[in-house]
Image (tube, rainbow, N blue to C red):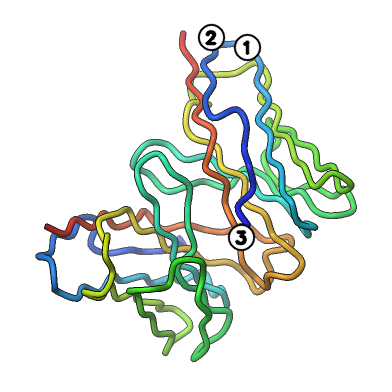
Amino acid sequence: DGGITQSPKYLFRKEGQNVTLSCEQNLNHDAMYWYRQDPGQGLRLIYYSQIVNDFQKGDIAEGYSVSREKKESFPLTVTSAQKNPTAFYLCASSRQTLYNSPLHFGNGTRLTVT
Amino acid sequence: QQPVQSPQAVILREGEDAVINCSSSKALYSVHWYRQKHGEAPVFLMILLKGGEQKGHEKISASFNEKKQQSSLYLTASQLSYSGTYFCGTHVATSGSRLTFGEGTQLTVNP
């Protein structure tokens, strides 16, 4: 079955360390997204990519970086510059246009930084 | 700009109805609705397109008022499984291929 795989499910890091969250999809979708979710809040867009080797900043890109070297993969690096990195991170994908195509989400990675 | 959802929370008894609203200050191409259970990924429910077309869940209905840039999700004869947080995501004409989500509406259905 096609889907989006995020790993790991839980991640613990010490403050000051960079950490990379994995996201892989086999839906043959062109577009991929990273959202951050804090307790009791909505989803905020970090970065998105509509095509390989191209990506755009979302609403809260500071302290994060991404790459899109392959269509199937869109890893997110949380850098030490991110002031409050503890959160639930969701990766999603869609066909090229969101006008009539839904987002498909992975199961998320819960990152805790102490 | 983030769409505004109302109410923030609602508690129902099984079999009761609920309406969740989503309002945007910008011209919308489409509105998406998702439901998220605690600790899980959001699940797609419905897309409402400019022009009136809808795609999605057979047992859930929704409306999209293009003039007011508002959408409403109608949950009728609620079931226990309807519990969760409902998010609307708005696709704005000037924002490219991205969705901006509201803060969510927490729905609890009790027996």
Q: Does dot 1 land on a helix, a strand or a loop?
A: loop
Note whether A63 is above or below B46 in the view shown: below
How far apart are labels 3 and 1 at the CA level? 30 Å
Identify which amino acid the numbered label 3 is placed on.
Leu
Disc 1: CA contacts within 10 A as few (<14), some (14-19) or many (>=20)? some
Spatial separation of the CA atoms under disc 1 and disc 2? 6 Å
Residue on which the image places disc 1: B16
Which amino acid type corresponds to the residue marked 1 in the rendered image?
Glu
Pointers 1 and 2 in contact (CB under 8 A)? yes
Mark 3–mark 2 distance (CA, rounded to whole Å): 32 Å
User: Looking at the rendering, in which quadrant would you find the N terminus of chain B?
Assistant: bottom right
At 46% from the left edge and 12% from the top edge, which residue is drawn?
A: B110
**Chain of the residue under label 1:** B
**Viewer-side label of 3, 2:** 3
- The residue beneath circle 2 is B13
| Residue A3 % position (x, y) | 45, 62
